[in-house]
Image: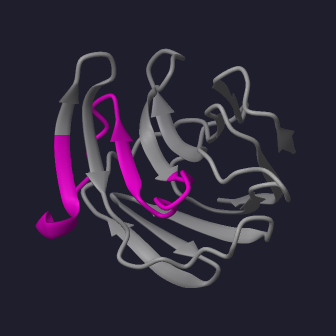
Amino acid sequence: LHCKGKPNGYLYTDKDYTNFTLTLQWRTPPGAKPGRGGVLIRMTGPHRIWPKSLEAQLNAGDEGDFWGLAGYSLDGPADRRKVVEHPQFGKLTTLKKEQAAVKPAGQWNTYEIVADGDKVTLKINGQLVNEATGCQSVAGPILLTSEGDEIEFRKIEIVK
């Protein structure tokens, strides 16, 4: 999938998923500036920018961070966790990654997201970079976002 970045929004699965392993590859296309994107899981509530869900961040420099959007709850170590109230998007909870594992722009990277009950783990290129606990374990679609910048996805696999 090649996303030009406009308009802001997302593609989403027609099925809902609670517990699963999602693997996919993504990259910034050769020659494009590293930008923004994300993978959202366990989305509930109405469709909007950005819906209640857990985001595995793809923004350049922040790849591997988790974001609980629109009040989606998650927990993790206090030194990497922050909660803010946003006037437009509501309660946002972030859990920063433990380490960087991304290849340079233009090269393919692999995400592996494992959602198992209230725990969600994230590996980038085979390295564990984040683990959230206390996650809302709800069924919802999986979304690939378009956030204003070019991004490509391939080899997307969901295993229940």
In the foreground, 12 or 130: 130
Q: Is residue 81 magenta?
A: yes
| Viewer can see residue 77 | no
Q: Position of residue 121 (x, y in %)?
A: 45, 69
Task: Check the picture and name the quadrant holding the C terminus.
Answer: bottom right
Quarter occupied by residue 92: top left
- In the image, taking residue 39 as reference, residue 88 lies left or right, namely left
Q: Position of residue 85 (x, y in %)?
A: 18, 29
Q: Position of residue 80 (x, y in %)?
A: 22, 65
- In the image, taking residue 80 as reference, residue 70 lies left or right, namely right
Residue at position x 32%, y 16% in the image: 88
State which region is magenta: 57-83
Quarter occupied by residue 149: top right
Residue at position x 62%, y 47% in the image: 35
Q: Position of residue 128 (x, y in %)?
A: 48, 81
Residue at position x 79%, y 71% in the image: 107
Quarter occupied by residue 104: bottom right
